[in-house]
Image (spheres, rainbow, N blue to C red):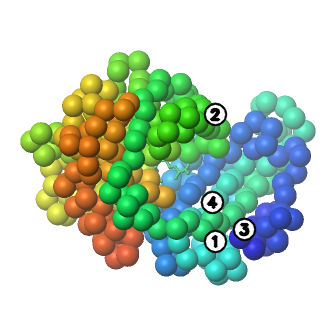
Amino acid sequence: MPRYAYANGRFRPHNQASVHIEDRGYQFADGVYEVVPVHKGQVVDEEPHLDRLARSLGELRIDMPMSRHALKLVSHELIRRNALTNGFIYMQVTRGVAPRDHKFPKAKPRPALTMTTRQLPAKSDAQVDSGFAVITAPDQRWKRCDIKSISLLPNILAKQQAAEAGCDEAWLIDADGNVTEGAATNAWIVTDDKKVITRQADASILPGITRLSLTQVMARAGYELEIRPFSQQEAMNATEAFLTSSTNFVMPVTRIDGQPVGNGHPGILTMQLRQTYIDEVVTGGRGAAPGDVYRSMAV
Ligand code: PDD
């Protein structure tokens, strides 16, 4: 257990930090969050994560709870107090505390900021070598998946379905039979002719920060990238597949619905991308710049 959490404007012992019973996040999931990776005590891609937080809040007309500078100070202090080396900072901002009523409160409450950290072991070579097994499941989410909302019921149900099938992730399928993204990750495939494909960052997916930085890494290294939807069938027939997220970086997908992807082992290109991403962004600090989230989005 981490030692401290941040809530109600203070650092508190983790097991004593709490939120008000009428917090609109608790009652309505009226809030947003960020999961910001930490590697060797350093925050990875901090600016684009804070950009995305600001954007999610803006879309819901919730004010930033404090300045960007203050958010950094608080999160860095939490890393220090919890002696966090590898893992993530979880930041959540809700519209605040008000008597239960669906519409926005007339007297604007103060947005409620909470922060926790979680230590995670780095993925072992064995985990990466076996890759992730995914299932496919219908995408039952709302039409604003670009907002990193704390309302995650469809994601939770899909992830649970994957876990019950002995798998690591669920790839969500839209009404046209295309993969949107994973329950908590972005989805990618590699074709026979070595083209890397991932869906466009519109309202149907979360614009992943790992996705964004990886596209930039790929552009610098001269990889060919096609941004377009791909179907469930294309994914099943792909030579390689992988997923991206702040907690997995670039992770090979080796099985889809029980069928091996390619030869059932992590793809060569996938492993190159994983290594390059780790070298450049995670340890090298060459991630996305402030403003890149906005520039990368179609909505
Ligand atoms: N999940 N898509 C969804 C639906 C996600 O929830 C996430 C992140 C991603 C990847 O985004 P990023 O690269 O910025 O982590 C894509 C986080 C890690 C979570 O909810 O735990």
What residue does disc 2 label? Answer: 153
Q: Which residue lies furthest to the left in this view?
A: 193
x then y, percent, for residue 43: 50, 72
Q: Residue at x 63, y 60 (%)?
A: 90
In the rendered structure, which amino acid carries the disc numbered 2? Leu
Q: Residue at x 63, y 47 (%)?
A: 32
What residue does disc 4 label? Answer: 90
- Pointer 2 local density, CA inside 10 Å: few below 14, some 14–19, many at least 20: few
Q: Which residue is drawn at 69% across and 64% down?
A: 116
The answer to whether residue 150 is above or below residue 123 is above
The C terminus is located in which quarter?
top left
Q: What element carries label 3?
A: loop
- Pointer 3 local density, CA inside 10 Å: few below 14, some 14–19, many at least 20: few
Whole-Å distance between the Cαs marked 1 and 3?
Answer: 17 Å
Q: Is mark 1 on a helix, strand or loop?
A: helix
The answer to whether residue 175 is above or below residue 98 is above
The N terminus is located in which quarter?
bottom right
Q: In this view, does 295 lie to the left or right of 184?
A: left
- Pointer 1 local density, CA inside 10 Å: few below 14, some 14–19, many at least 20: many
What residue does disc 3 label? Answer: 1
In the rendered structure, which amino acid carries the disc numbered 1? Ser
x then y, percent, for residue 57: 61, 48
- Reading the chain from its start, which is encountered first: label 4 or label 2? 4
* 1 or 3: mark nearer the eye: 3
